[in-house]
Image (spheres, rainbow, N blue to C red):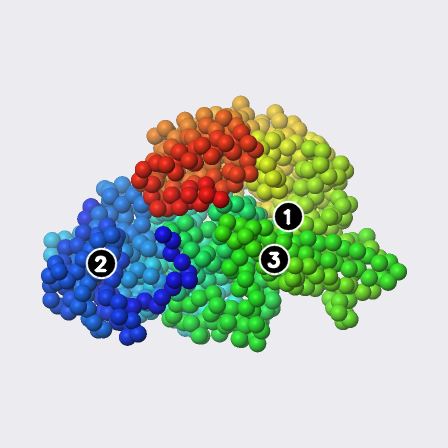
Amino acid sequence: SPIRLSDYRRPAWTVDTVELDVDLEIDTTEITSRLSLRRDPAQSLPLRLDGENLELLAISLDGRPLDAADYRYENSVLDVVGAHDGSMLETRVRVRPSANTALEGLYLSGPRETGFLLTQCEAEGFRHITFFPDRPDVLARYTVTLRAEQARFPVLLAGGNPDGAGELADGRHWARFVDPYPKPSYLFALVAGRLESIRRDYVTADGRKVELVMWSEANVIDRCHYALDALERSMRWDERAYGRNYDLDVFHVVATHDFNMGAMENKGLNVFNAKYLLADPDSSTDEEYRAVEAVVAHEYFHNWTGNRVTCRDWFQLSLKEGLTVFREQQFSADMNSAPLKRIEDVSLLRRTQFPEDAGPLAHPVRPAEYREINNFYTATVYEKGSELVRMLAGHLGQDGFRRGTDLYFDRHDGHAATIEDFLAALGDANHIDLKPYLAWYAQSGTPRLHARGEYDAARREYTLTLSQLTRATPGQPEKLPLPIPVKLALFDQHGRMLPLHLDGQTVETEKVVVVDKASQRFVLRDVPSHPVPSLLRGFSAPVVLECDYTPTELALLLAHDADGFNRWEAGQQLAALAFDSLHGAGHSAACKAWCDALAASFENPAIDDALLADLLTPPGEIEFADRQSEVDPAKIHAQRQELQRRLAQRLGANALLDRYNMLSSGSEVQLDAASQAKRRLKRRVLELLALVDTDQAHALAARQYETAAGMTDRLAALGLLVRDRAPQAAAVLADFRRRYADNPLALDKWFAEQAKVPGEPALANVMQLESDPAFTLKNPNRARSLLGNFASANPSGFHRADGLGYRFFAEQLAELDALNPQIAARLATAFNGWQRLEPVRREAAHTTLQGLAGREGLSRNLSEIIGNVLQH
Ligand code: ARG
Ligand code: ZN
């Protein structure tokens, strides 16, 4: 039965201090733990600790070995009788790192001869290491002593400050770490093995000397420099933007190729998926550089939003994740281009979170129940959670938000907090009641905001009627109106911004109105002519805006809106109208209007290259599917291609070729914004050229592949040739394979690009790649590259009418589930949305899902996802 938020009880037993002694070996590791226990005097429950798959070797209470009658270890809990407030419980357990394929708890990364040991504890991995009340509201101080054979494990690391090290008999050695800050068990970490490091001294704004250290296996240590720079930038930024200083003497970061997620913010010892830490021009794209910077910042920012102030329970996950994603987004906007970052983030939200919110897996940012918490590290908790914080920050303004977070840190430092606590601190610091925003955390589904404008020329009044509606989601038939901040501006027919008069006062050219009822009218006075409204500027709320713009109005905003995000957004909406017009719906003039508007942008030297590249990209297939009640992915793919072909035709092969040549220069990779922007536009221009002069574009791509100075250009060329199944594709793929034989992250891209070949040919490709010697389900990055891209990033390839894509994928999921339930469950979310497929595909997906659900021995992770996907 599920775990419910409404069932929360304070822990009956907590732990003041933990002493862990860990004797490390690849196959069996022994862990001795001494817990000093604290009993809640208001509760009388006996002591119960979590423990998963532990081999119990010894147990004693207050120095006395326990009789069999005094404890019981069954069904993943340890019950102990006779404990009292102040008792010391000592246990010794054995675990098996090399047999741990789930990558949760203590496990081996890499081959057993050369690999290293590490831990992953969030959310409930610590119970795989020792017995503990494994819940985030139990904060304890940790002392960790690691012991291992020196030659095999020369580096021994744990969270906290180093507190001694030395040699032991028999070629073994030890190292101790003490963490002075009470922390929940999910932030515990250790790492042991052969690792190299790069280091940098850092002095915090409040004067603490810190040693920053990046660790990786020897062959990739040269690729850690960019991450180290990014870490330093993150630390400075958090000091400046939030007044937050780092708080230990060391900050360790370790890269691994075997990791279930992006990275993990363990106190003082972050662990990263190598994909988000390593970067060099030859193997990383510009996007990957930005992702490394963002994830390094994200994990660092957790030190305050997550670690110093942690979550009371896992329902509050967005308290740390939504806020930390928001802080990362602010940081990345500051380091790079703010409008481009906003476009990227909103695109991600629409591609991942909107479909989640619209389908059977919909859940609130603060879920009310779950069976398996690892299934709730979702786009809703992270990305929508960040949008909610953004609305709060927007409501309070920059200074008000800072006052609010200062109070939040003051009040809750060293404690486990709730989302109510967060809203209360932000509100109290500003004497504002933010409680109405709590409804956003509790209600799932994306609100639709309908806007209608009416102009009264005689009275010079513009009346904007804004209404909201959220459709029912699983388990939530009734929806309430939410407070939706709508940032708006008005443009005249020449594209000039109009001054706004609302509620009698003159204000700026931009204004925020908050819609908090089902429908509301806002009257703007003294409007000289029929205006075109620019609404939801900067994407001021995570809603779907429905406004009956004409193509001409959207083209006007695309040409003139000073808000870079809304300019792009006008283009996206115009592209959507154009898309509809291709199948005879809506405005027949929309496609021409879209092409004409972009042709003008193409010639406009004032538009930044990267923004232009984004303008020239219509919404993706997933976003188009989201707008349809019955989805045929093959048709959507074909129509989107047709839309782009018309754009390419309008721009003209010659103009595209000229622009491509203009953008092709430089034999070395520069990472400045302008150089990155050039590469982004160059890629887009070449893709468009391929739609009108295919042979020419493929020849250019083959040459670009040969001569590329870095991965961005090389992969862009390879991707185009592979997706188009160009005659040059085979040779280029073979070359790439040879070139990057020893670089697993680059090889992941080789699998990913082939998994994204559209349409019917994809499946045969993917099936063949699945039996490639370099493919393995044991490595999450590799599994995601091939299977994740096929099922989640290639709708026309996966959703075959014959259902064979589903059957193949389901087989893989079942096999993967036996190894790594977290990854299997994550990949299975690709089935989200099957109910909206056209009947033939729907039936095929349904049959496959039922077959999968009926299998014996599925993990809790996978069965929860399949069950939810099928149920609603
Ligand atoms: N806290 C990590 C981060 O977002 C992610 C941990 C994900 N854990 C999981 N079990 N899925 O930075
Ligand atoms: Zn996080």
Q: In the rendered structure, are the residues bearing label 1 and label 2 in contact, judged by CB atoms less than 8 Å apart?
A: no
> Cβ(mark 3) to ligand 2 < 8 Å?
no
Q: Residues within 10 Å of mark 2 (few under 14, many from 20)?
A: some
Of label 1 and label 3, which has the lower sequence position? 3
Q: Point out the frontmost of discs 1 and 3.
A: 3
Of label 1 and label 2, which has the lower sequence position? 2
Vertical comparison of 384 with 37: above or below: above
In the picture as drawn, the residue positioned furthest to the front comes out as 477
Q: Residue at x 66, y 45 (%)?
A: 572
Q: Amino acid at mark 2?
A: Leu
Q: CA distance from mark 1 to mark 3?
A: 22 Å
Residue identified by numbered label 2: 78
Of the pair 126 and 119, the residue shown nearer to us: 126
Residue identified by numbered label 1: 611
Q: CA distance from mark 2 to mark 3?
A: 46 Å
Of the pair 546 and 265, the residue shown nearer to us: 546
Q: Amino acid at mark 1?
A: Leu
Q: Residue at x 76, y 36 (%)?
A: 588
Q: In the drawing, does residue 456 fall left or right of residue 110? A: right
Q: Residue at x 44, y 74 (%)?
A: 411
x, y percent for residue 335: 54, 57
Residue identified by numbered label 3: 541
Of label 2 and label 3, which has the lower sequence position? 2
Vertical comparison of 479 with 794: above or below: below
Q: In the drawing, does residue 821 fall left or right of residue 244? A: left
Quarter occupied by residue 578: top right
